[in-house]
Image: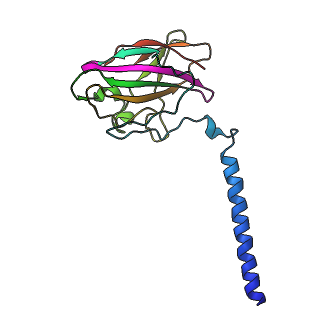
Amino acid sequence: MSIRFTAKARRGMVAWALAAGLAVGVTGCGGSGGDDAKKPDSSSSAATTGASDPSPQEGQSDQPLAELRGSGGLLLQVTSAQRDSGGFVTVNGNLKNDGAKELLIPAALSGNETEITKNGPSLGGATLIDSKGKKRYYVLRDTEGRPLTTTGLGTLQGGQSLTVFMQFPSPPADTTEVTLQLPTFSSTSIKISG
């Protein structure tokens, strides 16, 4: 009987130690002091028929900050450009087929860098130009070379729009206005908030 009691006691202690370890681990994951809170999300990809929605950004408004016209009736409405304390800027917007017919999103939007294009259609060709600092900022990439932007772009039906995002290294804090460029689109000036 004492052997059975000892075995039950050991199992109880193991279960208690495991539960305590998990509780400490969960508490550690939820804090804001770790470096993970400062890194951009690298799992941002979209299916061929849709796209991942960026998380809502503060400062996003109903009126677009800017509109860029592209080839074939594409329209990019920039809804926000938010600076993050982690050292990057996230540009959110809506990519719309302003025409009546189905439209294949041009592969040129991915840019021409092999590391980005091998990961499929994306907005990886986008850049931010800081005229004041005389610098060009390219879309950020994760450790496997995937662009931190909406990916998996395919076709848009006439009138259909898609929520998109692009993340860039942050220009210096005193730079509040930059030019957004995207292949096949007109370029435009946008204001960075945050």
Residue 18 as seen in the image, left or right of residue 154: right
Image quadrant in which you'd find residue 102 = top left
Q: Is residue 87 magenta?
A: yes
Q: Quadrant of the C terminus?
A: top right
| Magenta residues (range) | 71-88
**Residue at (50% x, 21% y) in the render:** 80
Nearer to me, 19 or 189: 19
Going by the image, does 59 lie left or right of 124? right
Q: How is the image coloured?
A: rainbow
- Among the 4 quarters of the image, the one containing residue 184: top left
Against 96, is 5 above or below?
A: below
Q: What kind of secondary structure does the magenta stretch mostly adopt? A: strand
Q: Furthest residue to the bottom? A: 1
Q: Is residue 8 left or right of residue 91?
A: right
Instruction: From this view, report whether residue 123 is shown above or below residue 2.
Output: above
Give x and y (percent) for residue 55: 52, 33
| Residue at horizontal 48 percent and vertical 30 percent from the top | 140
Q: Which quadrant: the N terminus?
A: bottom right
Can residue 112 be spotted in the picture?
Answer: no
Above or below, 3 against 130 in this view is: below
Q: Residue furthest right?
A: 2
Extreme residue toward the front, this view:
62
Task: Give the percent coordinates (x, y) of residue 130.
Answer: 51, 13
Residue extending farthest to the top is: 132
> Residue 71: percent from the left, percent from the top?
27, 19
**Most foreground residue, 87 or 93:** 93
Q: Is residue 158 above or below residue 25?
A: above
Question: Residue at horizontal 44%, vertical 38%?
Answer: 145
